Amino acid sequence: MKPCLHAVVVISVGLGASGCERKSEPVPVSVSQADSQAGRAQTPPPSVNPAVIPPTTAREGAIRDGDITDQVLDAIKTDAALSEQARKVSVSTLNGVVTLKGDVPAQSDREIIHAKASRIPTVIRVDDLISVQPAKTP
């Protein structure tokens, strides 16, 4: 495939040696117009939106999200410093964004869980929806 250049070529007739008026106005001609006039095929420029990163396949994304969720859950469930209730928080992941939901008895539980989720290298962001509900004493 031929690269397509996008440039404007200005064709003009220069001024005479005596500094007289210009004899004609410049005529802007783009390279693709020149190609068209010469009978060459035009190749449209690629349309790339730099703000959009090409997505991986849905299956790859789902596997990656599932792996992230498993890693966060493993980190939470194996931490003896967390309360039993804190180890039961809900963890879900979508496109690398981890969402934490549930109730914990102490702010320290919430902070530990949030930190563990944030440390997973492939996590983009953590949405922490955990509520601190201190245990009621009878």
Image (tube, rainbow, N blue to C red):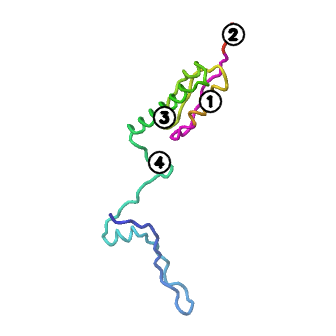
Instruction: Say if 118 sits above or below 15 in the image.
Output: above
Farthest residue in the front direction?
80
Which of 16/90 is in front? 90
**Which residue appears at 38% of the width and 37% of the height?**
59
Label 2 element class: loop
Of circles 4 and 2, the one toward us is 2
Label 3 element class: helix
Instruction: Say if 45 sits above or below 92 in the image.
Output: below
The numbered dot on residue 137 is: 2
Q: Circle 4 is placed at which residue position?
A: 53
| Residue 133 colored in magenta in the image | yes
- Tell me which segment is drawn in magenta: 119-134
The percent coordinates of residue 102 (x first, y second) are 57, 22
Q: Is residue 12 left or right of residue 1?
A: right
Q: N-terminal of the two: label 2 or label 1?
A: 1
Q: Is residue 37 left or right of residue 106?
A: left
CA distance for labels 4 and 2: 52 Å
Q: N-terminal of the two: label 3 or label 1?
A: 3
Quarter of the figure with the C terminus: top right
Instruction: Residue 38: name its quadrant.
Output: bottom left
Q: Are marks 4 and 1 in contact (CB under 8 Å)?
A: no
The percent coordinates of residue 96 (x first, y second) are 50, 37
The numbered dot on residue 112 is: 1
Q: Circle 3 is placed at which residue position?
A: 68
CA distance for labels 4 and 1: 32 Å
Q: Residues within 10 Å of mark 1 (few under 14, many from 20)?
A: some
Q: Amino acid at mark 4?
A: Ile
Which of 6/15 is in front? 6
Q: Amino acid at mark 1?
A: Ile
